Amino acid sequence: MDGTDWTDRYRDKLRSADQAVAGVRRGQRVFIGSGCAEPQELVKALVARGESLADTQIIHILTLGTAPYVDPTMIDRFHHNAFFIGPNTRQAVSQGRADYTPAFLSEIPRMFRHGRMPIDVALIQVSPPDEHGYCSYGVSTDIVKSAAECACEVYAEVNPNMPRALGDSFIHVNRISGMIPMDKPVLESKHREPDEIAQRIGRHIADLIDDGSTLQMGIGTIPDAVLANLTEKKDLGIHTEMFADGVVDLVERGIINGSRKTLHRGKIIASFVMGTRRLYDFIDNNPMCEFHPTEYTNDPFRIAQNDKMIAINSALQIDLTGQVCADSLGEYFYSGIGGQVDFVRGAARSNGGKPIVALPSTARDGTVSRIVPTLYPGAGVVTSRGDVHYVVTEWGAANLHGKTVRERALALIHIAHPDFREQLMKEARERHVVPADQPVVLSAGAPELEIYQSDVTLADGMILRIRPIRPTDEELLRDMFYSLSPDTVLHRFFHVLKAMPHAQLKDYVNVDYAKRVAIVAVAPCDEGEMVVGVARYGVDAATDEAEVAFVMRDAWQGRGIGTHMFKRLVAIGRDRGITSFTAEVMVDNKVMVRLFNRCALGPVKSTLRDGAYHLAFSAGPKG
């Protein structure tokens, strides 16, 4: 096809917005372009001729502009069907003036192509044609591409401000029925800076992301907070349905480069963007960015081809078994399924992948817990309890995958807001989800405990994390106890201990961090952690001295872990006002005696009594 052919056709197709929508007939199904690419002039023109229309169905996912077709005065002329409910259509859906079709974003194009939801007219916005006659879908390829390919008629606003996004994101002039020239700024999506809650969530998620990971995330304060906490990471990649401005910062710093991606190495893969002009200029004609329709970007099997795939999605509510509600508030439909399940399942099947659901622990200014015993009546489950892996709030991260209902409830209660933990635990006990004697720790996940987390690099390069013990560590400590040799058990507990039941373990893991402190050394193990060492102290109310105790897995002894934990424990105690420490050490436990003498900040006073050394030493100066 030579250039004259398409340029002549282009001139023949020029229309005003009013002329373009003049052919829309009663009862037809009209698709409207997505997100920031909503064709606003075409929408206005369509609504303006509403008096001559009836039962015209409008379909789209989230759009950023106004939605005058859902106004109560338009009820006999237009009827909206939302694949994803946005602020501009939420009230209409809740009042029954519009419909909601729950669907995975990856599967919506199939509905168009297979005739389950045929499209008569598609109204879209594109970039000007290139020298070959191809227009880019710009900021929104998503389901727009499949809708335009399936529609009987396509009318497109041609906007020079629309970036020319590359990838599988083009439509030829010959496919477009009418071209509507316009020159207006592309809609922008701006939102507030992440608050402290979002920043804490971002830090917890960043801890789960390894160098070389590939990320999926959406728009909002939590994704922005995650990106802000990735400045020390290396060689990250992007495979997502959408991204916003924060990605640009990390690309410019070389942190996001895609160099370790196992699918589309070096490329940012997405289906749409929502952001500011800076983001649109970044994607314009940028070969680093490839845009594809959602049947490609959101295909779980394709997502899983990215090693270390990290999927970060949001939720409105989670129950104690791990059921995730993300599209409704009880019976009130709020948003949509979107791509959450697509990416949760894709990341779960990725080599080293981690699906993450993130949410603030409370709503309505802290008066309502988002972690609940049971979902509200009518609430829909988007991610099932069988699909859920990591759940993150500002109070910490819980990995629920492969865990019992008891373990899940315990983990979720301790990342719920402390104001609601007692009630959550009470209801869990009453339902026999947790043992009747299960305590609740209000200090778990407190921000002031985060400073006691540190990493130690062993001689072989392995990195261990030292962190405060958690109520959810009970199973990890049980595993550790039954791995210990009889001599190690004897040295730690001063008698032969054959079992470590829940009644005893719960006292070890439920620590108040007022008079008692415990830290653990954990090594990465498959999808979770393995506790390799424990150090703790308890304050004697009579003397104000803190008695310390240590235990280490036999296979991990002699690697310097005890030395690091000793120093951390003493520093924590000193920070909390402890001035002196004591320890009881069996005479034949020479390794521990040497540890105390080597690491104590000052002379160690040793007294032999009843076959054991009573050791005492100063905490040293504070700070």
Image (spheres, rainbow, N blue to C red):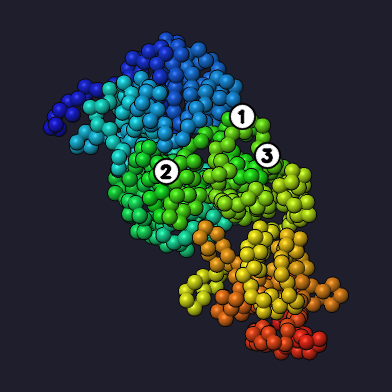
Residue 364: x and y in percent read 67, 40
Residue 283: x and y in percent read 35, 46
The label nearer to you, 2 versus 1, is 2
**Does residue 164 appear to the left or right of 248 in the view shown?**
left
- Residue 337 versus residue 473: which sits nearer the camera? 473
> Can residue 466 be spotted in the picture?
no
Q: Quadrant of residue 367?
A: top right
Q: Which residue is mark 2?
A: 300
Seen as rendered, the residue at the extreme top is 52
Residue drawn 41% across and 59% down?
Answer: 212
Where 265 sits versus 576, above or below?
above
Q: Which residue is mark 3?
A: 374
Where 201 sits versus 141, above or below?
below
In space, the residues marked 1 and 3 are separated at their CA atoms by 16 Å
In space, the residues marked 3 and 2 are separated at their CA atoms by 29 Å
Q: Quadrant of residue 533?
A: bottom right
Where 87 sits versus 44, above or below?
below
Residue 404's disc is none
- Residue 184 versus residue 435: which sits nearer the camera? 435
Q: Amino acid at mark 2?
A: Pro
Q: Dot 3: what SS?
A: loop
Q: Quadrant of residue 522?
A: bottom right
**Does residue 368 appear to the left or right of 543 in the view shown?**
left
Q: Dot 2: what SS?
A: helix
Q: Amino acid at mark 1?
A: Tyr
Q: Which residue is mark 1?
A: 332
Q: Amino acid at mark 3?
A: Thr
Count neighbours of disc 2 (C-alpha within 10 A) and say few if under 14, some if 14 to 19, many if 20 or more: many
Q: Earlier in the sequence, mark 3 or mark 2?
A: 2
Residue drawn 32% across and 17% down?
Answer: 19
Residue 363: x and y in percent read 66, 42
Seen as rendered, the residue at the extreme right is 542
